[in-house]
Image: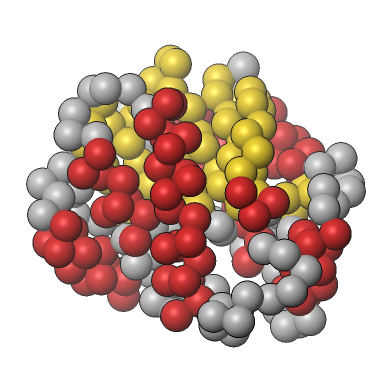
Amino acid sequence: MTNDVPIDRPPIDPHPLSPYVAWAGNRNREPILQVFKELFPAQGRVLELASGSGNHINYFAPHFPGLQFQPSDYDVEVFEAIKQKRDQFGNRNVADPVQIDLRAPGSWLDSETRSYDAIFIVNLFQVAPVAIADGVAQIAARVLTRDGFVAIYGPFKVDGRYTTASNEAFDREIQAAKQPDWGLKDTQDLERAAAPYGIALKRTIDMPANNFILIFGRS
């Protein structure tokens, strides 16, 4: 995202079925896919948290025939959209979505249910409370395989600072909506939340449009 708002960008709206989320997802899914092609194992299971409309998981799945993908979201109203996209793409390796609320431990998976080689989250933290990082870390500690990882995509501050002027402008735009918890989070906040559960930041990958993919794993 540049300082000038793209003319084709819809107004910011974090609802998973909004035109803005569809626009952003179509814009970033290919660069994310290229990174995942380097990171994902050839065989195994992958969990997406906050799948929303299922745009990303259904775009990625055909490229990884040896992986089984599990979509999830706290909002069961999006489940039909996820399944419709699965049918549209013909993705036999995408399971039915499950409800996971990152603020509700009773909804979290555990290793007795199934383990995962990777967990990914796309564009969530700028429109969600940083407290959900605690839920992400606890789920990771429960269900990641020994060498598994969590990949979190989005714009972030680093060490309390904006990495670009455009991210600062984007943050001001988000906060102008005056919605609680909206705004860019700092990578240090995620690290602090993850540490008590034996999860640590292993790698930061620079992405187009001043975004990052943060890779967390067992410490």
Q: Is the image coloured rainbow, by chain, by secondary structure, or in one colour?
A: secondary structure
Q: Is residue 115 above or below residue 167?
A: above
Q: Look at 27% across and 54% down and name the residue there.
A: 58
Residue in front for this viewpoint, 134 or 181? 181
Residue in front for this viewpoint, 106 or 155? 155
Residue 70: image location, x then y, percent: 27, 45
State the count of labels: 0
Quick check: can you spot residue 32? yes
Q: Give the quarter of the image for residue 37.
A: top left
Residue 26: image location, x then y, percent: 42, 63
Residue 205: image location, x then y, percent: 62, 34
Q: Is residue 182 above or below residue 202?
A: below
Q: Look at 61% across and 49% down and name the residue there.
A: 208
Residue 60: image location, x then y, percent: 31, 46
The quadrant of the image that shows the N terminus is bottom right
Q: Look at 42% across and 49% down and name the residue there.
A: 30
